[in-house]
Image (cartoon, grey):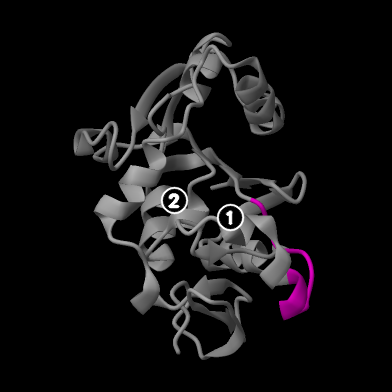
Amino acid sequence: MLCTLCSSVSESFCEDKKRQYFRCTVCDMIFADPDTLLSQAEEKLIYDYHENGPDDIGYRKFLNHLAIPLMDKLSPGMEGLDFGSGPGPTLNLMLEEQGMKMSVYDIYYAPDTGQLSRQYDFVTCTEVAEHFRKPDKSWAQLIGLIKPGGWLGVMTCMFTKETADVFNLWSYKGDPTHISFYTPKTMQWIARQFQLRIEIVSDRVILFKK
């Protein structure tokens, strides 16, 4: 099986009742067998049940894990894009409250591809990268949206262990729409591949500078 991120040889990592997972020998990404993915219609049905929104204080607190360290890199008036904003766009509003000019894009809920035809001072991607069906293309697209010197803020739960047993018990894997999993080594590979500066803020928040 070839890695869906770097196209290198990947080895079988583990298997559950629904699908098999592979781990790349080069970039260290773990990914679900591409032949076992949900259809886009099935995927959207799951997303439609999400109830997060701007009035949810807990959700705002969760998004602050990314917003606060990212804001330290930005200046009021900068233009940003929230990529994968979901059914209840919230991070864009939080950043607008801090003086940013925001646009949103989501394949299902804000599918205006015109937002993808320009570059921004920064791009946010929260709880989206784990859904990438073709991470090689999606990461290239994300980074292409950023102006030179701009920032990409990513939130996704990285796998920081080595054993397949731990991965199989990991709750983050339990969501059937989560199909691409990253380790710190994977994020470092992405930084090298696209010539980015990387700051790993936590096991869930990663900042890249172009």
What residue is shown with label 2? Answer: 143
Which residue type carries mark 2?
Answer: Ile
* CA distance for labels 1 and 2: 9 Å
Judging from the image, what secondary structure is the residue with disc 1 in?
loop
Quarter of the image where one finds residue 84? top left
Q: Is residue 161 magenta?
A: yes
Quick one: 122 or 166, which is closer to the camera? 166
Give, as a single range, the part of the protein colored magenta: 157-166
Front disc: 1 or 2? 2
On screen, residue 81 versus residue 186, left or right, reads: left
- Residue that appears at 25% across and 51% down: 41
> Which quadrant is the N terminus positioned in?
bottom left
The answer to whether 63 appears left or right of 132 in the picture is right
The residue at which mark 1 appears reads as 196
Q: Is residue 75 inside the magenta stretch?
A: no
Residue 162 left/right relative to 192: right
The local crowd at label 2, few if under 14, some if 14 to 19, many if 20 or more residues have their Cα within 10 Å, is many
Q: Residue 23's spot in the image, x, y percent?
A: 60, 81
Check residue 43 in the rendering and tell me which mark sits there, or answer none. Answer: none
Residue 133, picture quadrant: bottom left
Task: Label 2, secondary structure: give it.
Answer: helix
Rendered view: 191 above or below 164: above
* Identity of the residue drawn at 43% across and 75% down: 4
